Amino acid sequence: MRIKSILSAGLVAAAFAAGTASAAQSGFYVGADVGRSSVGTVAPGLAMTKSTDTVGGVFVGYQFTENWGVEGFYTGGGKFSATNAAMTGYGSGKSDVYGLDLVGTAPLADNFSVYGKLGYASTKTSASDTSGTTSGATRSAATYGLGLEYDVMPQVGIRFGWDRYGAAINNAGVKSNFNSNVWAIGVLYKF
């Protein structure tokens, strides 16, 4: 699978960089977050009846310099439900996202920094409906996000951010792409 190759390459690069840096400057970090997702219209002719959900995620990264790092992640993409235009069918689904991001960080005053992410993610969506015409699909696409980080202590930070992921379902034999937006707050620990 392509995303596994990308994650593997990122981890190899991080391991190589760690081997060339001193232990005090390793730059590895791990974290977890929780937030709210908002799913866009999943397919033409479907009216969303639920498009928000509480989601959680985990991430691991390596900060190469003060401004650049790489981050692998898993997060929930959210749950949704919809009816067809004639209101005769009802369906629902949920998404899970795995990916790798390049993270650019701009430090600000007083332990604050802003960050931007650009990467690639694979989103697996499971879906079904009462008519049997909707099924899940996998979509690999670019992902991006923005956020703010505050370092409570030198090794502990709090993040608030927004990320956008691409997803898809199969609806009546046609693959329909949609997007999921996630607003989350998280904590990270720097080694």
Image (cartoon, grey):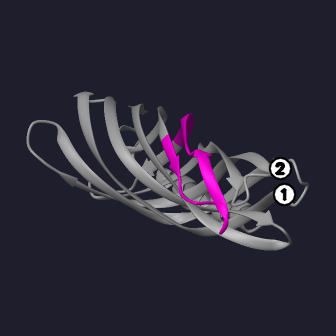
Residue furthest left in the image: 109
- The residue at 70%/70% (across/down) is 176
- Counting from the top left corner in percent of width and height, residue 45 is at 67, 66
Label 2: state its secondary structure. strand
Q: Amino acid at mark 2?
A: Ser
| Of residues 8 and 97, the one drawn nearer to the viewer in this rendering | 97
- 39 versus 58 height, above or below: below
Q: Counting other residues with Cα less than 10 Å from the Cα at mark 2, is it few (<14), some (14-19), or many (20 or more)?
A: some
Give the position of the C terminus as an image quadrant: top left
Residue at image mark 1: 135
Drawn side of residue 68 relative to residue 59, left or right: left
Magenta: main secondary structure: strand
Residue at image mark 2: 128
Q: Would you say the residues marked 2 and 1 are in contact, meaning their CB atoms lie under 8 Å apart?
A: yes
Q: Amino acid at mark 1?
A: Ser
Per the model, the C-alpha gap separating discs 2 and 1 is 5 Å
- Counting from the top left corner in percent of width and height, residue 178 is at 60, 64
Q: Which residues are magenta?
A: 37-59
Q: Counting other residues with Cα less than 10 Å from the Cα at mark 1, is it few (<14), some (14-19), or many (20 or more)?
A: many
